[in-house]
Image (cartoon, coloured by chain):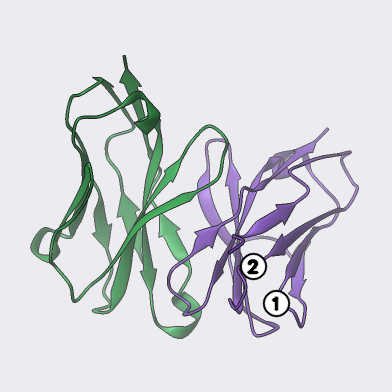
Amino acid sequence: AQKVTQAQTEISVVEKEDVTLDCVYETRDTTYYLFWYKQPPSGELVFLIRRNSFDEQNEISGRYSWNFQKSTSSFNFTITASQVVDSAVYFCALSLYTGANSKLTFGKGITLSVRP
Amino acid sequence: EAGVTQSPTHLIKTRGQQATLRCSPISGHTSVYWYQQALGLGLQFLLWYDEGEERNRGNFPPRFSGRQFPNYSSELNVNALELEDSALYLCASSLERVSAFFGQGTRLTVV
């Protein structure tokens, strides 16, 4: 069975601080995908990134960066110079690519509050 | 290009009634996934439809059902509503059974 753990439940930072959201996953499969989603108060899940298990290259997109380490089964997300608009719940998720197991398994989410 | 659209955005039903939620996937996407986000329970997988067939379902009772139409849109039906069915229901669509782009959700309230 797959499992995603987001040990941090709530994080509060002051605007312009950097913040890292942790994600640890468990799976016995060698082919899988990892995701991060942002859920603002409106409720919609906004897709941020997808990474496959064969690509450990870190990725940067503007103020967002992701660090994928298979050795520690972690896929951490860093927001640089946080802004108030970054306030939301962030979910890490795992998907296998084996037929019926392509569903997403989510972590419990991290509530990020960025104060002005 | 239009994203995943869900209707209605809000739905209020009485216990014991039936609710029907609808989802239109991104154009060209053939897979539709349904998830429930209930307070305190996180995001849980409900159902997956692909090419008109139910491919997988989560750990939910049979009164949660659905279907996918030839145009790949989907309906989620919840029969004999219970108070604990109150939740945000999210639909996602995918072309390659991997990436999932979500709609804005339907907030179901059972009173």
Q: Nearer the viewer, residue A61 or A78?
A: A61
Quarter of the C terminus of chain A within the rendering: top left
Query: The residue marked by circle 2 belongs to what chain?
Result: B
Q: Amino acid at mark 1?
A: Tyr
Residue at (30, 73) in percent of width and height: A32
Quarter of the N terminus of chain A within the rendering: bottom left
Estimate the x, y position of residue B37 in percent, counting from the top left. Answer: 58, 46
Q: Amino acid at mark 2?
A: Pro
Residue B56 seen by the camera:
no
Q: Nearer the viewer, residue B104 or A106?
A: B104
Q: Secondary structure at mark 1?
A: loop
Q: Are marks 2 and 1 in contact (CB under 8 Å)?
A: yes
Q: Colour of chain A?
A: green
Which of the labelled discs sits on residue A61, or is there none?
A: none
Rendered image quadrant of residue B32:
bottom right
Q: Residues within 10 Å of mark 1 (few under 14, many from 20)?
A: many
In this rendering, is residue B87 above or below A54?
A: above
In this rendering, is residue A73 above or below A12?
A: below
Query: The residue marked by circle 1 belongs to what chain?
Result: B
In this rendering, is residue A21 above or below B72?
A: above
Residue at (8, 64) in percent of width and height: A71
Side of A105 where B110 appears, left or right: right
Residue A75 seen by the camera:
yes
Measured in 3D between alpha carbons, the distance from the residue under mark 2 to the one under mark 1, in whole angstroms, is 7 Å
Which of the labelled discs sits on residue B25, or is there none?
A: 2
Side of B65 where B44 appears, left or right: left
Residue at (45, 74) in percent of width and height: A102
Q: Earlier in the sequence, mark 2 or mark 1?
A: 2
Estimate the x, y position of residue B17 in percent, counting from the top left. Answer: 91, 48
Which of the labelled discs sits on residue B72, or is there none?
A: 1
